Amino acid sequence: MSKIFDWQLVFTEIPALLKYLPVTLKLTVIALVIGWVVGLLIAFVKIHNIPVLRQICALFVSVVRGTPIIVQLYLTYFGIPIALKYYNFYNGTEYNVNGIPPIIFAIVALGLNQSAFDSETIRAAIQSVEKGQVEAAKSLGMNGFQIFRRVLFPQAVTVAIPSLGNSLIGLVKGTSLAFTCSVVEITAQGKILAGSSYRYFEIYCSLAIIYWVLTIFIERLFSYIEKRMSVPEQVTVVKGGMGNERN
Amino acid sequence: MKKNFAKKTVLGFLTAAAVIGALAGCAKQESKPTEAQTSKASEASSEETKTAESTTAAGENKTEPITIYAATGGSPKPFTFVDKDNTLTGHNIELIKAIFERLPQYKLEIEVTDFPSIFAGLDSDRYQIGVNNFAKNEKRKEKYLFTDPIFANEYVAIFKKDNAKAETIESWDDLAGLKTISQAGINITTALENYNAANPSKPINIEYSEEDLVLQIQDVEAGKYDFVLMDKPMFEYYQKEFNFNVTGISLNNDISKELMGEPFSYLIVSKGNEKLVEDLNKALKEVVEDGTSKEINLKWFGNDYSPSYK
């Protein structure tokens, strides 16, 4: 019986997989930005309780959080062409969905998924700031943006960072499903390599190592940011006193 | 407070209206310049689809080939896989390329995707062809178009080496009542399901799993399952790589033919592309008859599994 588990292959295959790391990172970073921006917008709608928009956002968050990401990837990647097919049929147009690169679909699906989760984190973080502080800021004559920038944001970020880091780690692993949309990232490349060597188990071990190391980096990065951002217990007295927005 | 609420309501409605309005506006703009095309399309037979139309159009005007998107899972080797130089190759891939060489009116683009995505992509016409050693069954026949056979398959049942049950196996009937494992959607599972549909009184126990074939064979070695079914050429590749403690029993092909109708592999094509299937069949026949198919088979399997069209 020859080797059932070729442990050397676990390490020798890593460089071949790492060639596709940029794709994984690209998916992660862009989806992350979409997630934060859209998540912030949704959080604002919820906090300010804007009718109609609030219901739409609540529905969106509920649907996205309530369905697996692989299903969402399928729905965007294959649902949009079906919708387009109907649209073409009824309007006589000739739009071709293959003109849009597949990675766009993956990024949009991952980004929107991320935004639904992050919106709740951001909302909770902003609401964790005492109302009295906002009122105090108002009485000092600050406008809405100033209150957000100087009072809400610095404090909310500290609260939100650990949860956002957590959901970012989830996102990194979510990108491994992008192969459903024909996007070749590291997991997809692993499956492709194994398709010709039959060494699936070894490749999945290599992938585990890569994702783990990636996650350690993110953990470190976020704990660093958390330390930098945290509001110190004891306020240091700065010369000039008032007007220092950091502390 | 009330005033504030009213203000917000108005704001909410306005924003929602603006967003919806913007979307609708885009839609209208898109449809405007196409009114002429709409009437053109309705003049033509309404059942003809977009692709069929453009196919005929290109037939007249040979300068612009139509791009056909084919999808493959990039596995299993040697049917379809990506080699060390990162190029897609294998029996199915070389064959489809040989076919398209004879069809200058089309341009072939092959995309590698997750296996279940091939079907979803065909449903949505994102891909027009699925190339992954596909077998045929009734349900698939309803949903997709099939070309003529591209490959005459031979299945082997793989048993643990000293399994007493293995000694009496000659045909599909002898597999009844035994336990096996298979991945949903692949040709082998289709064959098993076809057998069970034809013999509801004494079915084969199929357990479905996304488990890798290596693990499946190991499970057979460990006695978790009685057997796994595999394409014969694939089994030979696996044995070369892993040398498992198993035996492969070729199932009597006449019987399997009788039971399953067609132990062949095909290219599958999304609905509405009847013209494409016609062209593919014509070129496929050429490929088989002029020996290109035999050459490809010999290269990958050392044996000719070409279907015969006599």
Image (cartoon, helix red, strand yellow):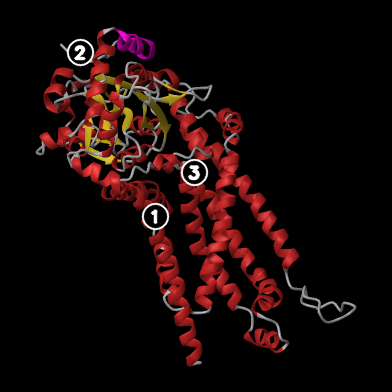
Report which quarter residue A32 is drawn in. Answer: bottom right
Which amino acid type corresponds to the residue marked 3 in the rendered image?
Ile
Provide residue B58's location: percent of width, then percent of height.
Answer: 31, 27
Residue A218 against residue B72 in the figure, above or below: below
Provide residue A56's location: percent of width, then percent of height.
Answer: 41, 70
Front position among marks 1 and 2: 1
Q: CA distance from mark 3 to mark 1?
A: 27 Å
Judged left or right of residue B28, residue B145 is left
Residue neighbourhood size for the residue with mark 3, other residues' Cα within 10 Å, grouped as few (<14), some (14–19), many (≥20): some
- Evaluate if marks 2 and 3 touch, with contact meaning CB atoms under 8 Å apart: no
Q: CA distance from mark 2 to mark 3?
A: 42 Å
**Does the magenta segment cover residue B257?**
no
Residue sitting at 31 percent across and 43 percent down? B124
Q: Which residue is mark 2?
A: B308
Judged left or right of residue B44, residue A24 is right
Please give the chain letter of the residue carrying mark 2: B
For numbered disc 3, what is the local secondary structure?
helix
Q: Main secondary structure of the magenta part?
A: helix
Q: CA distance from mark 1 to mark 2?
A: 54 Å
**Does the magenta segment cover residue B294?**
yes
Q: Nearer the viewer, residue A30 or B8?
A: B8
Residue sitting at 33 percent across and 29 percent down? B132
Which amino acid type corresponds to the residue marked 1 in the rendered image?
Gln
Q: Which residue is mark 3?
A: A103
Q: Nearer the viewer, residue A127 or B144?
A: B144
Provide residue B50's location: percent of width, then percent of height.
Answer: 27, 38
Front position among marks 3 and 1: 1
Region in magenta: B291-303
For numbered disc 2, what is the local secondary structure?
loop
Please give the chain letter of the residue carrying mark 3: A
Q: Which residue is mark 1?
A: B29
Judged left or right of residue B41, residue B126 is right
